[in-house]
Every structure is written in structure tokens, then in C-alpha cells.
Amino acid sequence: MNDYRNKMTAEEARQFGRDVLNIVAQIPRGYVTTYGHIAALAGWPSHSRMVGRTLRYTPGAEQVPCHRVVNAVGRTAPGWSMQRTLLEREGVGFRPNGRVDMQRHLFTPCRTLDDAVETSRHSL
């Protein structure tokens, strides 16, 4: 049994979307993070796919650096060939297998989500 809930209310889903965008906005140039890491920071560790949907379908998501989000092994989003180009322009290196070099470029925030959300609210 999981020690976390799997289903969100409508308000939790809206908050999740806001949290995802706030987290992604903080990924620095030259680094990436994963869908799973973002989902866990947002408090819903089993919702990594929902992170991808949020980035794809939320109006305004194009204003955050969503190209800096990859899967757990460093693979870029299928069907988005420009993602690799955008990452390479920022200095992100790729391994011979075409995946991001996660040892060099994985961003793992040391602050909590509450700090991140509070920081982004003050910068608006």
C-alpha cells in the first residue's frame, strides 16, 4: 500500500499545476530535472505523467523552461526534436546514447516546495 493518495480533487489538481510551473521556473540554465522529481516536490510522487500533461496543456506553460524537464534516464520528450537543441544551446551535454548526461546536469533543488512557491509568489 502507498503512503500517499493517488486521486486529486479539482482544487488539488489546480494547485498541482501551479506548483509544477513554479518548480520548473526555477530550473537553472544548463540543468535538467525529471518529471518524477517535480511530482514528488509537488507532493504527488505517483503523478509524474501528470507533470508532462501540465507542461503540455496548461496555458502559460510556454513561459517556463519546460525544455529542461526530461524522464528519469535523461530521455527528451518524444516528438519534440527542438528540446535537445534548446538544451544544447544552454550547455547541457548528451551521452552517446542520446540521453542527457544526468550525472553532470541533474538539478536537485535543496529548498522545499513551500520555499520555492513562496519565492515565486514574491517575484510576481
Image (cartoon, helix red, strand yellow):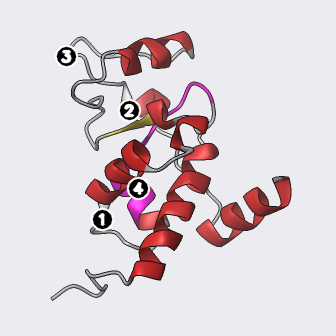
Tell me what residue is drawn at x 39 percent, y 62 percent. 39
Mark closer to the chain start, 4 or 1: 4
Magenta part of the protein: which range? 29-39
What secondary structure is found at the residue carrying circle 4? helix
Q: Position of residue 81 (x, y in %)?
A: 30, 16
Amino acid at circle 4: His
Q: Position of residue 34 (x, y in %)?
A: 38, 46
User: Marks 4 and 3, Cα distance to the nearest angstrom?
Assistant: 22 Å
Q: Is residue 83 visible?
A: yes
User: Marks 4 and 1, Cα distance to the nearest angstrom?
Assistant: 10 Å
What secondary structure is found at the residue carrying circle 1? loop
Amino acid at circle 2: Met
57 to 98, vertically: above or below: below
| Residue, disc 3 | 97
Q: Nearer the viewer, mark 4 or mark 2?
A: 4
Tell me what residue is drawn at x 26 percent, y 30 percent. 75
Amino acid at circle 3: Asn
| Residue, disc 1 | 47
